[in-house]
Amino acid sequence: MAVPYNHHEVEQKWQKIWDEEKAFRTSDDYSKPKYYALVEFPYPSGQGLHVGHPRPYTALDIVARKRRMQGYNVLYPMGWDAFGLPTENYAIKNHIHPKIVTKNNVERFKGQLHALGYSFDWEREVNTTDPEYYKWTQWIFLKLFKAGLAYKAEMPINWCTSCKVGLANEEVVNGVCERCGSEVVRKVKSQWMLKITEYADKLIQGLDTVDYIERVKVSQKNWIGKSQGAEVDFAITGKEEKLRVYTTRPDTLFGATYMVVSPEHPLIEKYRDEIKNYDALAEYREQAARKSDFERTELVKDKTGVQIEGLTATNPVNGREIPIWISDYVLMTYGTGAIMAVPAHDERDWDFAKKFGLPIIEVVAGSPVSVQEQVYTDVATGTLVNSEFLNGLSVADAKARIIEFLEEKGIGHSKTNFKLRDWVFSRQRYWGEPIPIIKCEKCGFVPLDESELPLMLPEVESYEPTDNGESPLAAMKDWVNVTCPCCGGPAERETDTMPQWAGSSWYFLRYTDPHNTEALAGKEALDYWLPVDWYNGGMEHTTLHLLYSRFWHRFLYDQGYVPCPEPYQKRTSHGMILGSNGEKMSKSRGNVVNPDDIVRDYGADTLRTYEMFIGAFDLSAAWSEDGVKGCRRFLERVWKLQDILAEGEGYSADLETKLHQTIKKVSADYENLKYNTAIAAMMSLINEFYKKNAVTRGEYRTLLTLLNPVAPHITEELWQSAGFEGRLYQAAWPQYEEEKTVESTVEIGIQVNGKMRAAITVSKDEDKESVIAAAKEALGDKLTGTVVKEIYVPGRLVNIVAK
RNA sequence: GCGGGUAUGGCGGAAUAGGCAGACGCAAGGGACUUAAAAUCCCUCGGGGGCGACCCCGUGCCGGUUCAAGUCCGGCUACCCGCACCA
């Protein structure tokens, strides 16, 4: 009898051996085929690892381990995205330097990951808060600045009243701060911005060249929000000045019955003296500014607005004079901040016109109901009417014709717009990368010389943001006051820091050559390792991290620093692990499971197996301790195969097909995110061994190898105690033969008129006639009437159609 | 409102290309072992009917295509996740 399975002993033993043997160290032998597997590096929070973390880490660990066994040079790295607010907030509260907090958290995380037996190459660990790392984050920023892609602008930003920090749009959820849940208001501040909008088209086009799961591609496309239309100039009656609008429906130009500008539109200040109701407009603007984004969206359906009295516009195609209104349903940040309103064919305009009694003119016919009763927005079937030279054209033709006309007359042109906004890159916070810029009254913004990088984050007394919203760095006069590198006069350092997204926008490059002091990574390393072959991460990062890092990478490509335009060849996403009640795990719900407890009670191999077996990888799944027990039981049964181990390096005749089938299935499933069915196939295989009460050494060897990527410790131990040569992690991945995956005889179902009636066993190469004959014999008197059709699907079934 | 996803036993979930629905696991029930319990092993396990060989129904709902539909087509419903006045 084998000794009992002691997961604690086995796991500690092999983790130590792997460390000593540097088992998973990535080779610098660039002649081998490479495989770069990547998982999102975690933010080392104070709570430690969550049971959600091991799901993606185990999945790609399986892929990495399998690739090594297949002879690849594998890069599977890990690091820490360690700048950020929670650490800083913790530091403020407990008066501990964020550096110390980070160090402690990283140690804890690292210990937990180590206990799970991941095959990360720890010699390539990176940490975004390490000056040797953020030196290059700053370096990339300088490149962006020099390319004109980083600029400072007065921006209405999302201001968190509690964190006292500007937030990116993406960090505001339902009008409150994503982190602390406090109210977010608008506040105008001078901010560093990155021109991601300049890359909008490239970021869309790049998606066609990569293998991302569909929903990631769709979300990114929607987020970038490309739309094609036209800009049209409307004359302001009696003025030289034109009011420019953006529209995706230039074909409906004849139906424009009024215009709307956003409350912040400069037109209002410019013609202040001629506007008769300026006070009313100013009042409306005030109200709009006070509304939080949340309130604005809450009131989507209820349109408000004020007419500008004293100004009107002229429709350039028919000379019609129309009123101009202001309303907060028009956004200053999109298009030109002004629209032409065509109430007959735009839902929002229709609502607005109905509310304020503005005229509705039909210019696209085809609606079954009058446009006075219901808006008509169908662009596929409509025909133009009331539109002079456009009459009778389809919407598509009318669009082309009107743009031609506008361009001819010089009153408009086609135009592409994007929903994507530039990236607010400043944070008024301490725990981030200092922005390497010096502000000089004479010379403006002067970039630090690259030789002065890294610009170190100075030691400060207090990390509290100041009440006026400046970064704590602003109080460090010694650090702030410098001489201008350009003119030698007095100057000040930029005191804002970078957002957390900065360091994570390029970390995958650093892993290829993490100790390089001359460059962010050496050219040879980048040429060899890039692109990342498989990147897995959360859906929540689709429009933030994933888009930002693609932007930076594409920029670096354009600058000649990286060898390929897209950083990630393949992107997949895992589902969440929910609490046992099916709800998201959270402290307040009291349904949090700590991975340490599972590792202690059941072992890392059990946890890994369970998280892979829990369900489809891309769907969320509820935690079940009973499910964990089931996986533990499976590993126990694998362990006890030792007791029925029989001689023979090959496969026994009756299980040969099953072995070949299992190798084929497990190999394919590991590649296709179907870890659950791979494990099911292995469970099914060992059930066969137990039925026979014997497993040959050859069968055992194959099983251990297939299972090793999922449960590396127990399989390595069993490999050794069975006396197989060398280490399992160095063994070759098992091969299968296609012909041997097919059973020589197979039981097939027999249907009559599509209903199952019997079953027979036939040889796989039996011809149709004899199978049908055997089927009829098996059916006997169950087959009545005249046979009109006989169907034989080899290996599957026979269907006899009778009338 | 727009976009995406999901719907199969008591539960988690299987089912390449339309081809024996419910693999694998969990829970439950019965049995073996035990003084007993745990662990382990064996059996049963979608619903209904029949003494029985067997028969009928069944993959959210309604229709269609097909010899054959969980799978394909048309039309719905419910839930989940994004985005949300983007002209």
Image (cartoon, coloured by chain):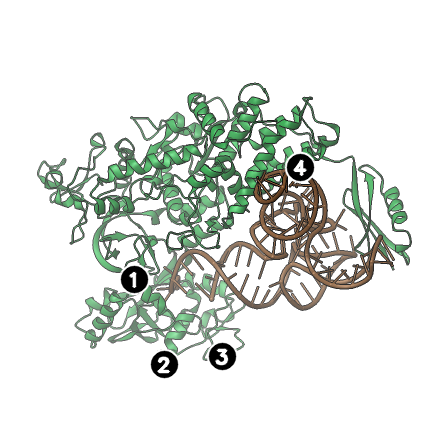
Distance CA(mark 3)–CA(mark 1): 32 Å
Q: Residues within 10 Å of mark 1 (few under 14, many from 20)?
A: some
The label shown at residue A678 is: none
Distance CA(mark 1)–CA(mark 2): 25 Å
Distance CA(mark 1)–CA(mark 4): 67 Å
Q: Are marks 4 and 3 on the same chain?
A: yes
**Going 34% across and 53% down the picture, which residue do you hit?**
A170
**In this rendering, does residue A330 appear at all?**
no
Q: Amino acid at mark 3?
A: Ser
**Going 55% across and 22% down the picture, which residue do you hit?**
A720
Q: Nearer the viewer, residue A697 or A127?
A: A697
Q: Quadrant of residue A439?
A: top left
**Mark 4 or mark 3: which comes first in sequence?**
3
Q: Are marks 1 and 2 on the same chain?
A: yes
The label shown at residue A332 is: 1
Q: Amino acid at mark 2?
A: Gly
Measured as percent of width and height from the top left, residue A660 is found at 68, 32
Measured as percent of width and height from the top left, residue A188 is found at 21, 57
The label shown at residue A357 is: 2
Q: Secondary structure at mark 1?
A: loop
Q: Quadrant of residue A5?
A: top right
Measured as percent of width and height from the top left, residue A761 is found at 82, 41
Numbered disc 2: what chain?
A
* Residue A266 located left or right of residue A171: left
* Residue A413 located left or right of residue A610: left
Residue A413 drawn above or below residue A710: below
Numbered disc 4: what chain?
A
**Mark 1 or mark 2: which comes first in sequence?**
1
**In this rendering, does residue A585 appear at all?**
yes
Q: Amino acid at mark 4?
A: Asn
- Image quarter of the N terminus of chain A: top right
